[in-house]
Image (cartoon, grey):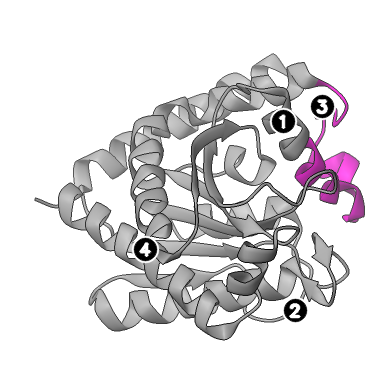
Amino acid sequence: MLKILKVLLIIIFSLEIAHAQSGKIRTIVIDAGHGGKDPGTQHSKLREKDIALSVTLKLGKKLQENLPGVKVVYTRKTDVFIPLHERAAIANKNKADLFICIHVNANPYSSKLSGSETYVMGLHKTEENLELAMRENEVILMEDNYKKNYKGYDLSSPMANIMLANYQNAFMKESVKLASMVEKQISKVGHRSRGVKQAGFQVLWQTAMPGIYVETGYLTNSTDKKILGSSDGQDKLADAIFKAVKAYKEEKEK
């Protein structure tokens, strides 16, 4: 396991140097969370997989129409199940400069929790973050040959999740910068910003570029639900993320 970690770290640092030399945002991969047999969180008739896909497609369209020269790649454009390791592989194969995951949150214990929160790969700061990461990572168990694809990864081990964070250290600064911009923009659409957080999401761990994991709101909150469940609300969320990416790109390419 340690030998595998060392090899992966060498690869990641090599890719980081290549990205740093270019300084350009040429390819953006957008990942609509869940899909197919994995609905994600659900509330009433609303399903996370549907909302995530809608926001993703709207975001991709805005990026393509407003950022000439930027290639947009989707991990999925329809309601299909894509294993986490394949989502990451799509980003790596396309040599993405940014990886953006779109998700929807929920809390079965409190309808008062509301707002967006954007995650970057990192050490778990709170028990809540750890539980969320481990809950999302459980989709691994739905994949064929998951033991082979994630050899050595123990879903029940907090230490395993903490260890995953080491892979993204090289991209932490840029990831946090983009995440902060996303939270700033989303707070303007009527959402409360819950800030930038760190968690060990498997899909971020396996990518070799700055990446963020956007929880666009809580389906279990009535105010958030209105935004998440409407086409207009989804468009506003997509526009907020687009504005953040545009601002990030402009600042990076000065």
The residue drawn where x is 47% and y is 46% is: 211
Q: What element carries label 3?
A: loop
Disc 2 marks which amino acid?
A: Asp
Residue 39 visible in the current orientation = no
The quarter of the displayed image where residue 53 is located = bottom right
The answer to whether residue 234 is above or below residue 127 is below
- Left or right: where 227 falls relative to 221: left
Mark 4 secondary-structure assignment: strand
Between 136 and 127, the residue placed more toward the observer is 127
Point out the frontmost of discs 1 and 3: 1
At label 1, counting other C-alpha atoms closer than 10 Å, the crowd grade (few under 14, some 14-19, many 20 or more) is few
Residue placed at 48% from the left, 33% from the top? 11
Amino acid type of the residue tagged 3 in the rendering: Gly
Residue matched to label 3: 152
Query: On residue 27, which mark appears?
Result: 4
Relative vertical location of residue 12 with respect to residue 86 in this rendering, above or below: above
User: Looking at numbered disc 4 in the image, what kind of residue is underneath it?
Assistant: Thr
Q: Which of marks 4 and 3 is nearer the N terminus?
A: 4
Q: Is tag 1's residue or tag 4's residue first in the polypeptide sequence? A: 4
Residue 135 in the magenta stretch? The answer is: yes
Which of the 4 image quarters holds residue 147?
Answer: top right
Residue 206 in percent (x, y) is at 61, 41
Q: Give the range drawn in magenta.
A: 134-157
Mark 1 → mark 4, Cα distance in angstroms? 32 Å
**What mark, if any, has residue 128 been given in the picture?**
1
Q: Give me the residue at 36% from left, 67% from top.
A: 242
Q: Mark 2 points at which residue?
A: 79
